[in-house]
Amino acid sequence: MAIIQFIEGINETVIPEIKLTRSRDGSTGTATFRFNNPDIIQLDMQEAGDIQGMHLKDEEGELMTTDVSAKFSNGKPRGIECVYIIKSPTEWDRFMRFMERYSETNNLSFTKAK
């Protein structure tokens, strides 16, 4: 099972839009996660704690980024955007294993850009 958490112990149920980029030589890349109205910004979650980062958890362990920013509309939080930086081919492989598990857990599919 693969999950995403912004606060330890609280699973995010909103499925993000995820965009991947990769360097020409395949050694580095980025994954940008965009969550529209995620659970963590709802009013009933205000007492749950502060967002310390985005945690990607599966049976292999945890990947984490602190590059997390809220998106606002008319002064109200509407979404969260997170960027996970991939710094090596090994990290890319690990990230893709997480994404395969996350996709299976949430019945998602991969669409390659044209």
Image: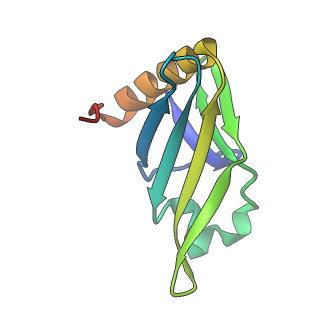
Figure check: 89 above or below 80: above
Q: Decide if residue 62 is on the left or right side of residue 41.
A: right
Q: Residue at x 72, y 69 (%)?
A: 47
Pick out the residue farthest to the bottom: 74
Looking at the image, is 44 positioned above or below residue 34? below
Q: Nearer the viewer, residue 28 or 6?
A: 28
Q: What residue sits 47% from the left and 53% below the top?
A: 34
Comparing 67 with 47, the one in front is 67
Which quadrant: the C terminus? top left
Rendered location of residue 30, percent (x, y): 55, 35
Number of numbered discs overlaid on the protein picture: 0
Q: Is residue 93 above or below residue 80?
A: above
Give the vertical position of 100 relative to 36 (above or below). Answer: above
**Which residue shows up at 55% across the image and 20% down it?**
92
Query: Which corner quadrant of the image does residue 101 belong to?
Result: top left
Along the line of sight, the residue nearer the viewer: 20 or 2: 20
Residue found farthest to the front:
24
Query: Residue 97 at what x, y percent from top left?
Result: 49, 18
Q: How is the image coloured?
A: rainbow
| Front position in the image: 114 or 7 | 114
Quadrant of residue 81 in the image?
A: bottom right
Residue at image position (76%, 61%) is 50
Position in image of residue 69 (x %, y %): 64, 60
Residue 15 pos. (x, y %): 41, 48
